Image: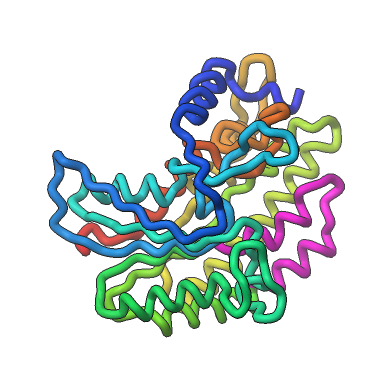
Amino acid sequence: MKYVVRVAVALVVLVGVYLAGRQNSGADSTTTTSTTVASAPASTAAFYLDVGASASLGFQPTGVPDHNGARTNTGYANDLVFREALRGVTLTLVQVGCPGETVESMLSTTIADHCYQLPMTQLRRAEQILRADKGQTGLVTIDLGFNDVRVCLDHLPVNTVCVAGALARVAADLPIIVRDLKASAGPHVRFVGLLYNDPYLGYFLDGPAGPAAASYTLASMNQLNAIMTHVYQSEGVAVANVPVLFQTDVTTRVALDNVGVIPENVAAACADTWFCYKTPFGPDDHPNDAGYSLIAQAIEDVVPARW
């Protein structure tokens, strides 16, 4: 019953809209886009540097076997550009993210990833951009940490030793990344660090052992978010409270047709990510269009009304 949870009408509409509007432009290159809404002439212009892993590129599943994921133009960064344009702010978006990036790989100078050729790394590229734009107004979002615990939660049973190690690495390495980025930025650059929802709450529907597995993943993600909140606040970085908008800690029971009575956070995880979809689109832990929109809202909530 795990993958039945998606309401049929919502599934058809979402997949149809997604397939019609998605953009597969390759994940490894730096891209620059901007959006202006004609009805609201821009009064402020700023750059937007989006640092992170696959979610920072709007990744969603393609449904293609052995290649089930591609960047899209409907990610949270794209949504944020559009939202800010409605407020009269023109953001020029630069995405430097790399799928699979972890806090460790961001700092590595000896192991190449599949997006950058050493000595270039995502962190070094981001620092170059920030130094070049030092006198400009800008926004930087940091979307790192999820992949460190992802490998521990991606399969049942959950690897508890792996989780402990991943949390320790995030606590040690994330502050270094934040300090390096801030040291390269000018005085008019705002930083926002993203917390994470828990797509693995969908395990709740995976048979008798599912509820316990979902509870453990939630505890793990809450630990991750607590560590990242401490790091960001200690470094003077605003925190985008993504899990609140995903109702990640709301356990009130709700009734769903063809599924039964389940916790609201499980229903939200299935509604806003691809985790509860059947093959070939799932299970996949990336947000869908609705989920990316929530992340954009969480960022907008901590961006000042006046730039």
Q: Is residue 158 magenta?
A: yes
Residue 248 falls left or right of residue 207: left
Residue 93 falls left or right of residue 289: left
Q: Which residues are magenta?
A: 144-170
Q: Position of residue 253 (x, y in %)?
A: 62, 30
Q: Position of residue 300 (x, y in %)?
A: 34, 53
Q: Residue at x 61, y 21 (%)?
A: 255
User: Which quadrant would residue 1 be assigned to in this image?
Assistant: top right
For the residue pair 234 and 55, the one nearer the viewer reads as: 55
User: Which quadrant would residue 302 be assigned to in this image?
Assistant: bottom left
Q: Residue at x 25, y 79 (%)?
A: 135
- Residue 155, placed above or below residue 230: above
- Residue 9, placed above or below residue 130: above
User: In the rendered picture of this protein, how many numbered marks are placed on residues?
Assistant: 0
Which quadrant, please, contains the C terminus? bottom left
Q: What sort of colour scheme is used for the picture?
A: rainbow
- Residue 96, placed above or below residue 77: below
